[in-house]
Image (spheres, rainbow, N blue to C red):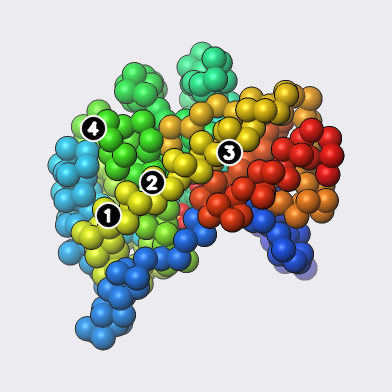
Amino acid sequence: MPHIASSVENVPYSRIRELGEMALGMDDVLRLYFGESNLPTPDYIKQAAMRALEDGYTYYTENAGLPSLRRAIAENYRRLQGVELDPKSEIVVTASGVQALNMGIRCALDPRDEALVLTPAWPNGSSSVMMANACVRQIPQPLSDERYGIDFDALEAAVTPRTRLLLYTSPSNPLGWVASEEEQQQLLDFARRHDLWLLADEVYDRLYYAGRELGDAAPSILRKATREDAVMVVHSFSKSYCMTGWRLGWLVARRDLAAKATQLNEFVISHAPSFAQKAGETALADGEPELRRMLERLEENRDLCLEALSGCRGVTAPRPDGAFYLFPRIEGLDDSFTFCRRLLEETRVGLAPGVAFGAGGEGSIRICYAAESSILEPAMERLTRFLRGGA
Ligand SMILES: Cc1ncc(COP(=O)(O)O)c(C=O)c1O
């Protein structure tokens, strides 16, 4: 009997989904396991999509996305990052951040190549490497003095003649860590020295709390890299504009890779939905006031969670500079999945187990704090009670 290819058979099931699916069968769960805001897409974006449908954006578009959206993305980089991009040759619109990630990885790796992935990280990057028939080497980010860092010695030691790619996420899901300027330079130097593609997942760059003012974007690697560097950046509308269900993102890449990704898009999804692309243009143009309001709320939520956990003995929760997650480490915890399952069954609070995020993730749990206070406050109350030993 024909069998399923072993390369895909070996791709592990997402353990965040596994927990989520258990929770979906239960009533009254306080859901903080998926990485999304519980705010609906703002009305001005929905209206832009409806207008686009009326205006006839119901046909195929270019494989790289509408030229007007690519120009809007380039304009966004100019304004927020001071970076000049050529919208015609360096930006590919994709049907989500995860598709950009998958496409970038697929274009960089041959079967049996190796990719270095900084973890704990959202599992989809490692799984995309496996789907490309390549091998993943996960390099945990060490925690010292309440800040995550990068173990460059471990990275050096992991390089082999087959290593082609280094993937990192900044701001990080699940750590909330944001690469410092110095770390970005070191990552770039490392990639240049070893002839690697450097793939930066920057889908959370607008959710940044350590800038000069709220609303500043976390600095992109594109500020440091030249357009000739083997650098790619993955981005998405999902997180900044509450558009997870729309499936719209983009890839910035060196011209040769961007051209290939554009061509391959034809065979994967052809392009992102036309009217969603038009709505994305409106989000980029008019989204700042709403984004500011969301950031203020997220910052308050982050502080509420940190405050709640500060009273729990044996719990270390580094203060995140970006994204909308806390990743507290719990002393003595060696089975985060069982911890989260019990928490769910006994208190109806749904969190993601640290083990889902690869090497270095076990022993921690991930809290997505992009929820309204009517959910977050009771969830933190129940979690802290559970941590203190009472369900
Ligand atoms: C680090 C990271 N990258 C990419 C994505 C993909 O976002 P989307 O596929 O919704 O655009 C996510 C979503 O959770 C994420 O956390």
Q: Which residue is mark 4?
A: 223
Question: Which residue type carries mark 4?
Answer: Arg
How many neighbours does mark 4 have within 10 angstroms: few (below 14), some (14-19), or many (20 or more)? Answer: some
Closest to the camera, between mark 1 and mark 4, is 1
Q: Residue at x 59, y 56 (%)?
A: 374
Q: Which mark is residue 305?
A: 3
Reading the chain from its start, which is encountered first: label 1 or label 4?
Answer: 4
Q: Which mark is residue 289?
A: 1
How many neighbours does mark 2 have within 10 angstroms: few (below 14), some (14-19), or many (20 or more)? Answer: many
Locate residue 278 relative to residue 297 in the image: left or right: left
Residue 57 seen in this snapshot: no
- In the rendered image, residue 277, in percent from the top left (x then y), is placed at 30, 67
Q: Residue at x 54, y 46 (%)?
A: 369
Reading the chain from its start, which is encountered first: label 3 or label 4?
Answer: 4
- Label 3 residue SS: helix
Reading the chain from its start, which is encountered first: label 3 or label 1?
Answer: 1
Closest to the camera, between mark 2 and mark 4, is 2
**Given contact means CB atoms under 8 Å apart, are the residues at marks 2 and 4 in contact?**
no
How many neighbours does mark 3 have within 10 angstroms: few (below 14), some (14-19), or many (20 or more)? Answer: many
The residue lying toward the viewer, choosing from 161 and 157, is 157
Where's the C terminus, which quadrant?
A: top right
Where's the N terminus, which quadrant?
A: bottom right
